[in-house]
Amino acid sequence: MTTLLDVKNVSKTFVVGKGFMGSRKAKLQALHDISFSVGEGESFGIVGESGCGKSTAGRSILRLVEPDAGQVFYQGEDLLTANRKRMRALRREIQIIFQDPYASLNPRLTIGRTLAEPMLLHGVATRRDVEEKIQSVLAEVGLPPQAMQKYPHEFSGGQRQRIGIARALALDPRLIIADEPVSALDVSIQAQVLQLMEKLQRTRRLSFVFISHDLGVVRHFCRQVAVMYLGRIVEKGSVNDVFEEPLHPYTQALRAASPVPDPRAKITVAKIEGDAASAMSPPSGCHFHPRCPKAMDICRREYPAWREVGHRGVACHLYPAKAGDAHAA
């Protein structure tokens, strides 16, 4: 499979709050040396608890958040070195769907104007044919032509998310960053929106970076997945491998806590002791060790190198390091 997106060793630190009388400001490391690749027509999932850095990872690709270090290659071109004019052109091919389908839409603009503006700005439509193109993309997401004249508040949450998807499709992208696109929707509506996205992926051969805290949704939609904890990728591989036989204790706990859609299934829910640590003051060694039932002395002293185990990778001292293993995901 041809690689469309290649993220290499991306890091991002935020300065939190303001120092008092010149005192030191707190720093929050949202991302630490994260790496992953997305193939053409592939869906790559990023999962983890709230605050793990997964949304920052998605926004860093589009440079909505500017990374401090690393490289983001799109079709071999490093997005982080592109100037403003070039980045604007590249954003035609890389779009984003936001989590909140209402807050991401301008309440003062009709849906027609919301979709027309990017088309006209990027020259994918003229004023003569823009209405026809808007109706076409609305039909693609299951909305009638009359939606053009309406405002966001006149639609349900599921319909608004369809409008958000239509806006992402308006420029004919090849890659879409989907940041928790169904988490704000009812379960039945989630299924409809996921089915729509699957259909669009097939018909348009789209690639997705799909960000979610819901393992069930990621398992349904994605082929590859990365699991994040406190700004780092702790496990990465195919969805089937990672969820059928997770290696990292954190991934095991996430899977155990995920609902199983079978009332006859008997599962043992693993309890994670303690609360997630703060990204402003992460624990020494492996950041998960205070909550890990399998923690060893080395886990408290040293962050584990990235180990290749079969066809996937994991950052955990439970697995022996081999020659050539890297220190980052």
Image (spheres, rainbow, N blue to C red):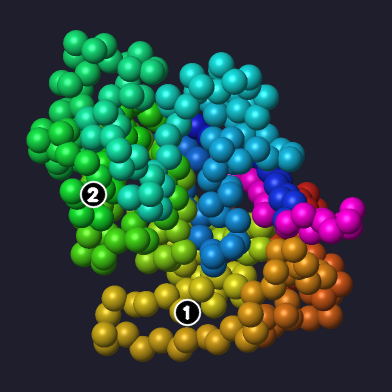
Q: For residue 177, what is the image quadrant?
A: top left
Give the residue at x 42% y 34%: 95
Percent from the top left, x then y, of residue 90?
50, 23
- Looking at the rendered structure, the kind of residue marked 1 is Ala
Kind of element beneath mark 1:
helix
The residue under label 2 is 153
Is 181 on the left-hand or right-hand side of 130? right
Q: For residue 24, what is the image quadrant?
A: bottom right
Q: Are marks 1 and 2 in contact (CB under 8 Å)?
A: no
Vertical order, 119 against 250 (above or below)? above
The residue under label 1 is 256
Visible residue check, residue 198: no
- Looking at the rendered structure, the kind of residue marked 2 is His
Q: Magenta span has 24? A: yes
Vertical order, 273 against 168 (above or below)? below
Is 126 on the left-hand or right-hand side of 307? left
Is 253 on the left-hand or right-hand side of 188? right
Q: For residue 146, what is the image quadrant?
A: top left
What's the magenta region?
17-37
Q: CA distance from mark 1 to mark 2?
A: 38 Å
Most foreground residue, 196 or 148? 148
Give the residue at x 46% y 79%: 257
Q: Magenta span has 137? A: no
Percent from the top left, x then y, of residue 314?
65, 61
Percent from the top left, x then y, of residue 247?
59, 69
Percent from the top left, x then y, of residue 123?
35, 13
